[in-house]
Image: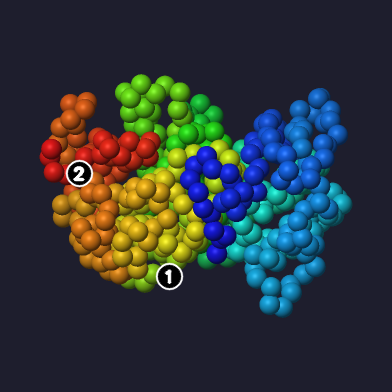
């Protein structure tokens, strides 16, 4: 579990248990030396720092500040020396990362290519995002480049690594994986089962490529995470997660798979992005920025396993890691962070918000089967900014299947209208959501309310009373 994070936005980040590191780091290259420069700042009196030597301008690579690992506090794990009996997986991961930082540059590639299982295990139980941030910023450019080139999968999926760097790594990993699978299919010698599995994986990865759009897509899209194994996991950001004032994470429920819903889920995030900007303009705020995250970061259930809470627990941990990653990268300048969760995804979100100690700014739930939490008071959501929407003919709300009914009066959440009508502010017609899967449709009252909740305008959210 994470360390306790206390205090609201704008408070001293050290009081929340995170290193006070505000930075936007240079993105490292692919093998063709493609880079993006980003500036970052490391406040004084946090860790001892030393300036790196200037990088030759002709290389157009990152320059900045490097943390002196020898000056870190004593509680930072030491070098990784292999499995240690009784040590947690997270501690082993910390030691592995630090070992990489201490290796010679040529040895990094050899080690990572020779130990794929170590990388897989690390990504299953990764270190805390704040520890990853310290590790990544502590390495010089040549070490970062070597790690990225040897294992884009590792760099792309570690919370705490800068987002542009993760995007470059994940896009490289996506391209490499597609190429390898296409070779399996074209070669034809791997066996029928392997070829059919490769074809299915190609369909899944193709949906991610489609959802990413092109370099002309507006807003710009970032591939935040990518796991091609099994059902697959991925997250696509619309907008700039490094600088956005308002960030909304969309968490799906049952039947939402990468293969079938990644494009639709990204489209929903795009609609929310545009609606949030429209509302900000209407309120006279032309300066604030938003980012929305189409997050399918856990294996969502189907009819065979939706009755168990096991997948929600996986979603809990993955969602918590994503939130902690944002708070680590944006330490000292945290955005207004909202989770918008649907169906079984709301159970995962509720577990994360009760069993982890970070806080978010707002939570909106629709079609929720509940969780062990019995009231808003148990959730780590600031100022009780919790909303619940329930559509007509949706059989899931009020079921309290996993231990509570978030829509009950005793729970203490704000009711959120989803039944349509006329917008009292814009006078536009709002469509109704009916059944379990129409909450994210264009033009609905629910999408209007999601947008307002995500930009901190909860006072304007309709409550379904028609007034």
Residue 408 in view of the camera: yes
Count of numbered badges drawn on the protein: 2
Q: CA distance from mark 1 to mark 2?
A: 33 Å
Q: Residue 268, position in %: x, y?
A: 36, 40
Q: State which quadrant residue 450 falls in.
A: top left
**Residue that label 2 marks:** 463
Residue at 69% in and 35% down: 41
Please tell me how crowded label 2 is: few (under 14), some (14-19), or many (20+) other residues with Cα within 10 Å.
some
Residue at 70% in and 66% down: 92
Q: Which mark is residue 310?
A: 1
Q: Which quadrant: the N terminus?
A: bottom right
Residue lying at the far bottom in this picture: please name it. Answer: 85
User: Secondary structure under badge 2?
Assistant: loop
| Nearer-the-camera pick, 228 or 156 | 156
| Nearer-the-camera pick, 21 or 29 | 21
In the visual, does 22 lie left or right of 303? right
First of labels 1, 2 by sequence position:
1
Residue at 83% in and 53% down: 70
Q: Which mark is residue 397?
A: none
CB within 8 Å, label 1 to label 2: no
| Nearer-the-camera pick, 347 or 335 | 335
Q: Which quadrant: the C terminus?
A: top left
Asked if residue 220 is positioned above or below residue 105 in the image, the reply reads above
Q: Residue 5, position in %: x, y?
A: 53, 54
Q: Residue 410, position in %: x, y?
A: 23, 61
User: Secondary structure under badge 1?
Assistant: helix
Of tags 1 and 2, the one toward the viewer is 2
Please tell me how crowded label 1 is: few (under 14), some (14-19), or many (20+) other residues with Cα within 10 Å.
few
Q: Residue 249, position in %: x, y?
A: 43, 46
Residue 172 in view of the camera: no
Q: How is the image coloured?
A: rainbow
């Amino acid at each position: 579990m994470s360390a306790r994070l206390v205090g609201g936005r704008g408070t001293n980040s050290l009081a929340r248990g995170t290193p006070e590191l505000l930075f936007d780091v240079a993105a490292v290259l692919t093998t063709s030396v493609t880079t993006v420069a980003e500036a970052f700042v490391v406040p004084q009196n946090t860790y001892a720092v030393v300036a790196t030597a200037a990088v030759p301008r002709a290389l157009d690579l990152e320059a900045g500040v490097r943390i002196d690992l020898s000056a870190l506090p004593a509680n930072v794990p030491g070098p990784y020396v292999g499995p240690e009996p009784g040590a947690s997986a997270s501690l082993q991961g910390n030691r592995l990362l630090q070992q990489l930082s201490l290796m010679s540059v040529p040895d990094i590639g050899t080690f990572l290519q020779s130990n794929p299982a170590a990388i897989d295990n690390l990504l299953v139980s990764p270190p805390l995002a704040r520890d990853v941030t310290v590790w990544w910023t502590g390495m010089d450019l040549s070490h970062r480049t070597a790690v990225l080139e040897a294992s884009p999968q590792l760099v792309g999926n570690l919370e705490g690594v800068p987002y542009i760097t993760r995007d470059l790594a994940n896009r490289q990993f996506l391209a490499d994986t597609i190429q390898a699978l296409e070779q399996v299919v074209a070669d034809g010698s791997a066996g029928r089962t392997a070829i059919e599995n490769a074809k299915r994986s190609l369909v899944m990865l193709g949906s991610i490529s489609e959802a990413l759009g092109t370099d002309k897509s507006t807003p710009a899209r970032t591939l935040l995470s990518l796991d091609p194994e099994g059902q697959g996991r991925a997250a696509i950001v619309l907008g700039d997660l490094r600088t956005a004032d308002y960030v909304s994470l969309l968490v799906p429920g049952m039947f939402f798979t990468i293969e079938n819903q990644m494009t639709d889920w990204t489209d929903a995030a795009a609609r929310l992005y545009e609606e949030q900007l429209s509302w900000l303009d209407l309120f006279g705020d032309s300066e604030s920025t938003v980012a929305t995250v189409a997050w399918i970061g856990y294996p969502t259930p189907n009819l065979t396993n939706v009755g168990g809470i096991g997948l929600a627990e996986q979603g809990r941990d993955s969602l918590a890691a994503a939130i902690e990653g944002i708070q680590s990268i944006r330490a000292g300048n945290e955005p207004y962070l909202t989770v918008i969760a649907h169906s079984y995804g709301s159970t995962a979100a509720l577990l994360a918000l009760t069993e982890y100690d970070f806080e978010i700014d707002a939570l909106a739930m629709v079609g929720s089967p509940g969780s062990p939490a019995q009231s808003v008071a148990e959730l780590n959501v600031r100022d009780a900014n919790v909303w619940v929407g329930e559509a007509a003919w949706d059989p899931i709300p009020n079921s309290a299947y996993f231990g509570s009914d978030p829509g009950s009066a005793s729970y203490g959440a704000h009711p959120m209208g989803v039944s349509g009508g006329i917008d009292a502010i814009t006078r536009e017609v709002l469509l109704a959501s009916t059944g379990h899967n129409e909450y994210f449709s264009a033009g609905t009252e629910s999408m209007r309310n999601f947008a307002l909740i995500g930009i901190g305008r909860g006072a304007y959210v309709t409550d379904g009373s028609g007034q």
